[in-house]
Image: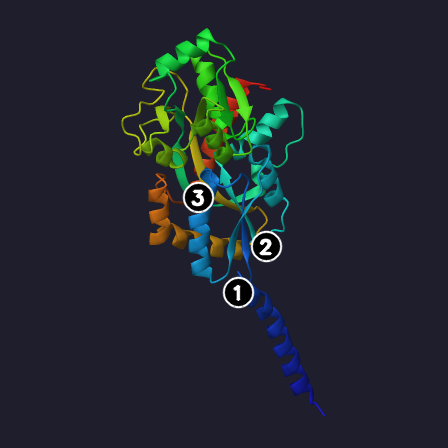
């Protein structure tokens, strides 16, 4: 028979076990595979950022970190999927700078936003590359002045590609077109990968894209880069002038890639994700992959990334409002 003292000890031991169980569950994260969603097809900036990070985080966590491409609607399908995912840390988003653009563009048309930026918790920034204006190597334009002259002579006839309406590549080109006073023909694709394929095949004649997705094609002699959307020249293309240098005001745009989680993920899990991301960004193999792609890392931890995100998002929202409704 149990004495009252023995019963009290059993109750205390049971309570301690219940208290310790959630702590052990949190400490065990991740206990299964993590999915890193990319809202674009393979071959674009988000995909090039996601794969080295996922592989390095997998080595650190000793659990699979699987990149899942969910292309469509300029990245909105993938972003919306993660925004609605269970906030347990097992579904992440490798986002691009278009994250803030899509909801604002939907509001321009009076449509409900597929998600809001506030639905995400920043984990860290991977890189932030200035966008580059690329044309086929056999195109007649050797510089931006010749391109602008041709576009003015042939309004809406020069086709350019994008990752979808109001996606990263579209907004950059519309910034340039508005500043130059030209009209181009917009041809949307599901992502940068298909758009680059169309540029290489001659189905489109211009594309705004990140250095990392263009480098190999420029080096092989298939593409030519005319200008850069950065405040300064891109390290991968030091001979290419910026639009600001060329006198085009407010033509500044960066394709950044950053890791996000649903906003309600518990703080201890976010801490683990930040730790895994930090280790991944210091990983030698991941850094070799970034450098080989021509997209050097620019690591920012969650607090600094949150500030970067707020400033960049405000600038892009202003750009979308300035561009207005574009069909």
Residue bearing mark 2: 88
Of the numbered discs 2 and 3, the one sitting upstream in the chain is 3
The x, y position of residue 119, in whole percent, is: 59, 41
Rendered position, 296 above or below 225: below
Contact, mark 2 vs mark 3 (Cβ under 8 Å): no
Element carrying mark 1: loop
Rendered position, 181 above or below 167: above
Which quarter of the rendered picture does the N terminus lie within?
A: bottom right
Rendered position, 153 above or below 234: above
Tell me which residue sits at (45%, 8%) in the image.
152
Residue bearing mark 1: 28
Tell me which residue sits at (43%, 52%) in the image.
277
Rendered position, 175 above or below 86: above
Quarter of the rendering containing residue 235: top left
Residue ranking furthest to the bottom: 1
Which quarter of the rendered picture does the C terminus lie within?
A: top right
Q: CA distance from mark 2 to mark 1?
A: 12 Å
Q: Nearer the viewer, mark 2 or mark 3?
A: 3
Residue bearing mark 3: 49
């Amino acid at each position: 028979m149990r004495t009252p003292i023995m019963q009290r000890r059993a109750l205390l031991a049971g309570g301690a076990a219940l208290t310790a169980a959630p702590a052990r569950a949190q400490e065990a994260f991740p206990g299964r595979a993590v999915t890193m969603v990319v809202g674009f097809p393979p071959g674009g900036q988000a995909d090039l950022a996601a794969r080295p990070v996922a592989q390095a985080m997998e080595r650190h966590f000793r659990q699979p970190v699987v990149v899942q491409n969910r292309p469509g609607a300029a990245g909105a399908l993938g972003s919306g999927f993660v925004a609605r995912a269970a906030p347990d840390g097992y579904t992440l988003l490798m986002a691009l700078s278009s994250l803030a653009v899509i909801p604002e563009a939907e509001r321009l048309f009076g449509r409900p936003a597929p998600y809001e930026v506030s639905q995400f918790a920043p984990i860290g920034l991977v890189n932030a590359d200035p966008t580059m204006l690329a044309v086929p190597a056999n195109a007649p334009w050797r510089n931006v002045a010749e391109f602008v002259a041709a576009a003015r002579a042939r309004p809406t006839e020069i086709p350019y590609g994008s990752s979808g309406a109001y996606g990263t590549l579209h907004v950059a080109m519309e910034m340039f077109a508005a500043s130059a006073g030209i009209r181009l023909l917009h041809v949307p694709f599901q992502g940068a990968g298909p758009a680059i394929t169309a540029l290489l095949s001659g189905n489109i004649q211009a594309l705004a894209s990140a250095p990392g997705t263009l480098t190999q094609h420029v080096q092989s002699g298939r593409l030519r880069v005319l200008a850069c959307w950065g405040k300064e020249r891109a390290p991968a293309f030091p001979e290419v002038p910026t639009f600001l240098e060329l006198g085009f005001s407010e033509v500044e745009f960066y394709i950044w890639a950053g890791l996000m989680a649903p906003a309600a993920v518990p703080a201890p899990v976010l801490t683990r994700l930040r730790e895994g991301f930090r280790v991944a960004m210091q990983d030698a193999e991941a850094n070799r992959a970034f450098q080989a792609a021509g997209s050097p890392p620019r690591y920012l931890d969650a607090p600094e990334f949150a500030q970067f995100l707020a400033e960049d998002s405000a600038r892009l929202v202003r750009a979308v409002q300035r561009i207005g409704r574009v069909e």
